[in-house]
Image (spheres, rainbow, N blue to C red):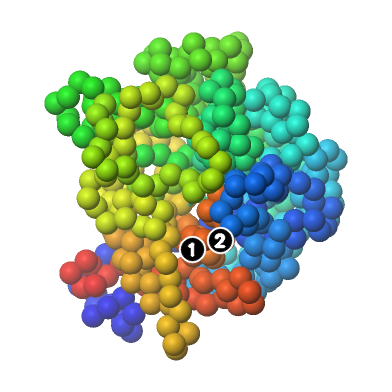
Amino acid sequence: MTILDPEPTATAVRRFPDGFLLGAAAAAYQIEGAAHEGGRTDSIWDAFSRVPGAVINADNGDVACDHYHRYRDDVALMKELGLNAYRFSTSWARVRPDGGPVNPEGVDFYSRLVDELLGAGIVPWLTLYHWDLPQALEERGGWANRDTAYRFRDYALSLHDALGDRVDIWTTLNEPWCSSFLSYTGGAHAPGRQDVAAGLAAAHHLMLGHGLAVQALRERDPSLELGITLNLTNAKPVDPTSPGDLDAARRIDGQFNRVFLDPIFRGHYAGDLLADVGHLGLRDVIRPGDLEIISTPIDALGVNYYHGEFVSSLPPEERHGGEAPTERPTRSPFPAAEGVHFHARGLPQTVMGWEVEPDGLRELLGRVHREYTGPAGVRLLVTENGAAYDDEVSPDGAIHDVERTEFLLSHLGAILDAIDEGTPVHGYFYWSILDNFEWAWGYDKRFGIVRVDYDTQERTIKDSGLAYQRVIRHRALPAASAR
Ligand code: IFM
């Protein structure tokens, strides 16, 4: 039997708990296009895409998947797939161009999108910030400037004014690690800065903005479900008996995971993290009261999981893939990880060079539940997980993306494993509903369960999408032995 067969037999399936959301995600700049329409002005990604060598093939989000004009058809596709929920982000530069007054035309786009989703019986899951700061705010210091956190709160409230009557689930930030360290320290993402202190300031101010927005939205409507999405990893030592490797794993865990988890859930930065990075600029930006704001209770934590990290104090024999493709020189995004080397484990890899390790998701969810969300009584969901492969269109027009299908099913299986061992997980969002603009990789990497032909904008559901459609219809996964 395969996942595409008509009916899985009752004994050969693993069922998802009642209420578990099976959805998919996308983000404004990656799919909307219409970059210069409806009053929208530049975000940092519009500006960064113009920097020579910053994005592969000099691609940009001007047109992307043209979702701004095709959102009705895209929602119809989501309905056909049976998605329970759709996680999308709003563009600050569309809603408040240049970070200034509200743009009714921009707000109206999201209002129509939300109505379309609700009409299709799909829960709208709104993310306020998925990396596309208005360029005008970057020119005033961007996230390294504390004031941006307050502007973010105002932007959140403007959207609540328009959508608060219809959207119940609000995520403040998507992957602040990327919009701080990868963007302000590593320079691989917009705005392309390479400054350790700016990256630490950005991380702190992003969390401050998160806390301010949660407070303000909660005050507006205590019934909202409020949360944040973090990209998290398992940082493992190559040699668990080597003090150098253990320290490498501790540093990466600290500067990737705990730098956000501890302030948000515990109201402090961990002592070892402060010892590593406090003197590099972090202590200078923490003001009295900040950590109380940042740790304002939330209702939901979204975990984005793609791969683990296998680290050592010794270099690998061969360089591990996965770096940004940019022709511009970049630096390590980690503020204090000199001497930490990233190794491969010999696992299969996606075309991003990311190792495929579904069981790492089970392990990560268990850890996050035990140490953070469980004690806080916060709902835990997987808000992104997905894989890029070089898809081929078969002569019959189908996309037989066997590897992506297996990736999707095996990660769903890992979530059921986590649930079986006592980790409550409440939902899963595949990344992404559509092939789209993969940041510095441009359109070169395809993550979608729906193919986008960028010449014609034609959409085709891939085999992975058809497999997901069946999982959603039956609310069950065929047991591994039955696939
Ligand atoms: O495309 C991105 C997304 O914007 C954020 N999370 C990771 C995805 C794949 O790189």
Q: Please indicate whether residue 280 sits to the left or right of residue 336 in the image.
A: right
Q: Position of residue 335 (x, y in %)?
A: 46, 24
Image quadrant holding the N terminus, namely bottom left
Residue in the image at 45% along x and 79% along y: 393
Quarter occupied by residue 422: top left
Residue 346 shows in this picture = yes
Residue 382: % across, % down? 42, 49
Q: Which residue is mark 2?
A: 443
Residue at x 27%, y 40% (from the top left corner): 343
Which residue type carries mark 1? Arg
Q: 311 and 417: which one is in front? A: 311
The C terminus lies in which quarter of the figure? Answer: bottom left
Residue farthest to the bottom? 396
360 in relation to 473, above or below: above
- Residue 446, disc: 1
Residues at discs 2 and 1 in contact (Cβ within 8 Å): no
In the displayed structure image, the side of residue 338 where residue 297 appears, left or right: right
Q: Residue at x 51, y 36 (%)?
A: 330
Query: How far is the residue under mark 2 from the one under mark 1?
Result: 7 Å
